[in-house]
Amino acid sequence: MTTPKVPLVIDTDTAQDDCIALLVGLLDPRADLRAITMVAGNVGFDQQIRNAFLTLNVAGRLGEVPVHLGCRRPLVRPWESAENVHGDGVGGMTMDMTNCEPDPEHAVDTLIRLAAESPGELTIVCIGPLTNIATATIKDPTFVDNVKALYVMGGSNNARGNITAAAEFNFYVDPEAAKAVFAAGFNITLIPWAPLTLEHAVFGPDQLAEIEALNTPLSRFFTRVCAATLDFDRSVGINGTTHPDSLTAAVLLHPELVTCTGDYHVDVETQGELTRGYSAMSWGVHGLVSNATVVEEVDANAFYDYLGRTLAGRQGQRV
Ligand SMILES: [Ca+2]
């Protein structure tokens, strides 16, 4: 018996682990990736587009999955980048972009259309700021009900941030969008930065060496893309590369990776003097109704093995 494929869109600010999440969506046999939608986030918008096409190319799927361009800035605030962390997001890789044309349909309209075409079936893997999702929610009142689920990478579960002490980057960049999305009534599974990513989705030096030793086009791509942040990660006390985005895509396709979840009411701070983008996650004792399933633990070894198998594959072209 074959397992039914999971229809999904990946909404991404493509740099580093976003690229690896795209590989998961492009290469996992369980995934039916219907579109890649782009949102302002990690690095310059046009660089993000190039990074998405580089990833499609290495996966051997150029021209098969459309790239749609979405919101180029947050709802209310000016865009802030994480280029100090990511550089260009792909370790300086380039390619001929002659045949890499984004689809002319705006990403927000794509999200609305694809959700409406198969109501209750489409999952959106949200691994950037939530600007496109919030905008789609405002534009089409039926969008929330048409979407099966959102798998959101963002926030921290009563734990430390990354761009500030209080906030994780995706929620910090567009806190108004994040707040709107959590208030909208979606079925949300949330993959937080801390403690989950820091405890369960960091690949240390030995694991990175194992991946490099695979010496496939995909593993070489991984090594080049992810190595660019190693110095930054070490400077902030993380001895390895972090993989919250690829974990988010992986747990959608392989829920058996998840070993513990909790029901939380999640809200996002938009006004705080020191806490812009802070995710307040209430664990059921404050009289608030749950609006998200928060992943609390995953099988870290199984996740690493899964990505290793993906990168060991024969798909992809030389880089
Ligand atoms: Ca991202």
Image: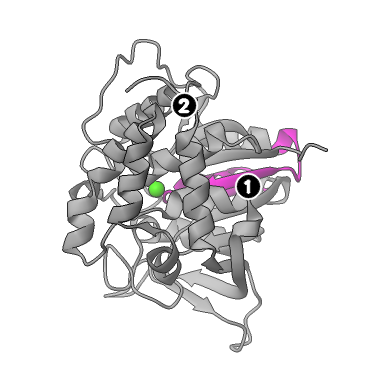
Q: Provide residue 253's location: percent of width, then percent of height.
A: 63, 47
The magenta span reads: 116-141
Instruction: Answer yes or no: disc 2 within 8 Å of ligand 1.
Output: no
Instruction: Work out whether residue 195 or residue 14 is closer to the camera in this orientation and state it.
Output: 195
Residue at image coords 33%, 69%: 161
Tell whether 273 sits left or right of 109.
left
**Which residue is under mark 2?**
59
Residue 300 seen in this snapshot:
yes
Q: Quadrant of residue 199?
A: bottom left
Q: In whole angstroms, how far apart are the C-alphas of marks 2 and 1?
A: 18 Å
Residue at image coords 46%, 56%: 177
Q: Quadrant of residue 155?
A: bottom left
> Which mark, by number, is residue 122?
none
Query: Callout 1: helix, strand or loop?
Result: helix
Q: Is residue 11 above or below residue 154?
A: above
Residue 293 seen in this snapshot:
no
Q: Is residue 285 above or below residue 20?
A: below
Q: Amino acid at mark 2?
A: Ala
Q: Quadrant of the N terminus?
A: top right
Tell whether 197 sits left or right of 80.
right
Q: Provide residue 125's location: percent of width, then percent of height.
A: 55, 47
* Label 2: how many Cα within 10 Å (few below 14, some 14–19, many 20+): many
**Which residue is under mark 1?**
253
